[in-house]
Amino acid sequence: MGGNYAGYAADITCSFPANGKFTDDQKLIYEAVLKARDAVIKEAKPGVMWPDMHLTANRAMLQHLKEGNLLKGDVEEMIKHGVNGILQPHGLGHLLGLDVHDVGGYLPACPPRRAGPLARLRTARALRTGMLLTVEPGCYFISRLLDAAQDNPQQSQFFNWDRVNQFRGFGGVRIEDDVLVTDKGVENLTFVPRTVKEIEDFMANGANFK
């Protein structure tokens, strides 16, 4: 969802349980994505490379999924072998401006597109004060990608397949916030319920969210 103000765009994504209450499995995946979002909000600042922020998000998400017994092994090795791209088959976010997916990601003087899962990023630039971007980590269980990972010994070793296969048909979770890069970090311009408690309370009580 989103809107326009003075011609400038916004872009926000919310994930929530249809019945107003998270199951344990829904909570596990949602909080993995929320931890990824939080890690980026904490670390992003001028001079930081956007691909590094993508990997920061991936590390946080993979670690939480490991703690939830979906994954096993070393998180850095998972990233080395592309497990992050199986579960988050999209980039961390994009520039915002007059267009929702704004231009300027790969200008001639900017860093080129990278290989592997990082090829999906809409920019590889360093963050600069005044930039407006989305931060939108996600976790998806896509059978085609999971099947390919299961057939790839370098990737398959990191999955607890009995557990992961329970999530086939789950779909996925994405959290998308709009942030402004400031001199010291980022300002999150998004004001919606984000924690499990906030979402459940909002779905029960609606207008009481502040």
Image (tube, helix red, strand yellow):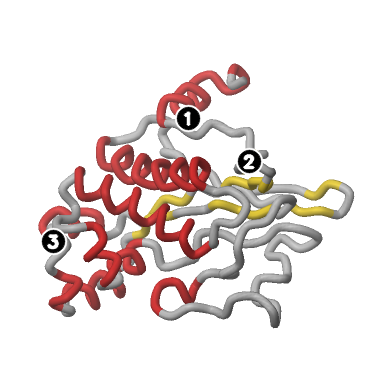
Q: Amino acid at mark 2?
A: Lys
Please tell me whether mark 3 sits on a helix, a strand or a loop. helix
| Closer to us: 203 or 181 | 181
- Quarter where residue 113 is shown: bottom right
Please tell me whether mark 2 sits on a helix, a strand or a loop. loop
To which residue does mark 3 refer? 161
Circle nearer the N terminus (3, 1): 3
To which residue does mark 2 refer? 184
Circle nearer the N terminus (2, 1): 2
* In-image side of 159 versus 118 (left or right): left
Distance CA(mark 2)–CA(mark 1): 29 Å
x and y percentages locating residue 72 in the rendered image: 14, 56
x and y percentages locating residue 179 in the rendered image: 64, 46
Distance CA(mark 3)–CA(mark 2): 42 Å
Residue at the (37%, 56%) spot, across then down? 58
Distance CA(mark 3)–CA(mark 1): 30 Å
To which residue does mark 1 refer? 199
In this rendering, the answer to whether 50 lies above or below 110 is above
Q: Amino acid at mark 3?
A: Trp
Crowd class of label 3 (few under 14; some 14 to 19; many from 20; radius 10 Å): some
x and y percentages locating residue 128 in the rendered image: 68, 56
- Quarter where residue 24 is shown: top left
In this rendering, the answer to whether 105 lies above or below 166 is below
Of tags 2 and 1, the one toward the viewer is 2
